[in-house]
Image: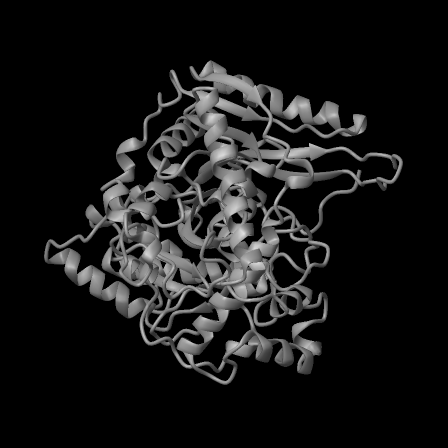
Amino acid sequence: MSKNGQTRRDFLKTSAAGFAAIAFYRNVKGEMITIGSGGDVHTELVEITVSELQAKMKAGKLTSRKLVEMYLDRIKEIDPKTHAVLELNPDALAIADQMDKERKKGKVRSPLHGIPILIKDNIDTADKMHTTAGSLALLDAPTPKKDAFVAAQLRKAGAVIIGKANLSEWANFRSTGTRTRQTSGWSGRGGQTNNPYYLDQNPSGSSSGSAVAVSANLIAVAIGTETSGSIISPSVANGVVGLKPTVGLVSRSGIIPISHSQDTAGPITRTVADAAIVLTAIAGTDPSDPATADADKKRAKDYSKFLDANGLKGARLGLLNVPPQRPALLAAYNAFWSPIFAALIQAGANVVELKFPDFGKEQVDRTAVLKYEFKADLNKYLAQRGGKYKTLEELIKFNEENKDKEMPYFGQELFVQTQAMGDLTDQAYIDLIAKSRKQTREDGIDALLSKNNLDALVAPINQLVSIAAGAGYPSITVPMGIRDIPAAPASGEIPASKSAKSAAGIVFAGTAWSEPKLIKYAYAFEQLTKRRVTPEFIEKMPSA
């Protein structure tokens, strides 16, 4: 029940036929299921889009306040299973009321006017919420002096920031331990975020809470951040759309950093159309972030204009397919992916199968680049933020003194290694960053595109994601359903594996500022395939 005492049935009466009470969706088995016949709260919000919500508000069948109340109800009901939402904004209803007043006066700021949105808890907000990167060390830090540029842009667009999403603590840049479910989606402050398909499975990270909340229909859209895979990977794992922009298209000011050469914020949504709407709102030049100097020149005024259902016709795509080498896994892999690759061709694309260059012993250690930049960038952020802990060295000490709360599952090896790095004037760093950019850009993505006369690259999630991240280039993923991964016997030094199920996604990536092309291709493929699966919050993955 909402705070004003109105029940779901009452709301459906007052909104007339504004929402369909029963709708059909695909479950993890590929079966069509009905949602809306009971057993859940406000199921009329399941799989709803921003445009559909705007149409209801424009028609007077829905208000922003009511929408916020409904999403709060869903969070209260469902999030105890997923633990995706770290904190709720106590001012959310007041902000929604203001948006409703503006709408009544004929002012609609943008397609996000009155739309609730979750943002990752490494994005500053100058309000009553905390900004902690999931760490207890920042729980008592001073409130940021101003909103992050991304948060300010969202408020300017009329969005209602409803809360903060959980994340892999410090954006997954604390431990070198095995990336188990304890490291992905876990923070000292928020605990473990759970995958909405199978609650005992890895939600991936670091934007775990943002992706899970969108997939679980706790919210329509959310903001994640990425350094190397942290938007794309959890979006794939949770069956949603993640868009990682070109570094410099979206400002990082007011975002707890890892790497100024790779960090960016971006939208996580259930549809490509919604991602385009959010990107339009948050892109732009910010004097506080020099990387965005060209953003206003390079950005599109409205990324929604590139939503073309026939957008793949005539496109030249480089397919980077890296199938598993183990015979026990290869047949199932091909059975799943071959029809998807064929669908690209059926949609009118010219597909050229390629391999990414192998630099062998000359392959740059991109993690070392991140370590150099993390130390410098984080210390700068902490000094500006104020509070008890002003350096990485002090955070390391805090974690040691609070091992029971901060390190029950994994350590802080990356923190310690990063603290030992030199500064950004070291020749070793200067050489590393130059070599990294050359391998990922000129000799990498740009070389593949140029030599093969390609418009973009496409792949199941693989090394393309980290390469695009290293280059600072954009990528977008489209849900491809649930994939069965058979058990495999031990082979040489490779241990045996159990059978599993996993959400799958296909990734489109390109050169700098190629978001319009990528959105066009992703939208066309999404409309052709429609393989997004609605989660049912199954407690455990079934055993073989």
Instruction: Name the residue furthest bottom.
Output: 388
* Residue 219 in sight: no
Q: 201 or 321: nearer the eye?
A: 321
Q: How is the image coloured?
A: one colour
Residue 342: where, in percent of width, then height? 54, 17
**Quadrant assignment, res 399:** bottom right
**Quadrant assignment, res 145:** bottom left
**Quadrant placement of the N terminus:** bottom left
Residue 283 to residue 188: above or below: above
In the picture provided, is 154 more to the left or to the right than 235? left
In the picture provided, is 300 more to the left or to the right than 392? left
Q: 430 or 397: nearer the eye?
A: 430
**Quadrant placement of the C terminus:** top right
Residue 472: where, in percent of width, then height? 45, 45
**Quadrant assignment, res 290:** bottom left
Residue at 66% x, 76% y: name it.
Answer: 405
Q: 437 or 300: nearer the eye?
A: 437
Residue at 64% x, 25% y: name it.
Answer: 336
* Residue 488 in sight: yes
Q: Disc count in the image?
A: 0
Residue 474 to residue 214: above or below: above
Residue 118: where, in percent of width, then height? 41, 59
Q: 70 or 302: nearer the eye?
A: 302
Residue 97: where, in percent of width, then height? 24, 65
Residue at 50% x, 51% y: name it.
Answer: 211
Instruction: Name the residue furthest front.
Output: 427
Residue 341 to residue 543: above or below: above
Residue 127 to residue 536: above or below: below
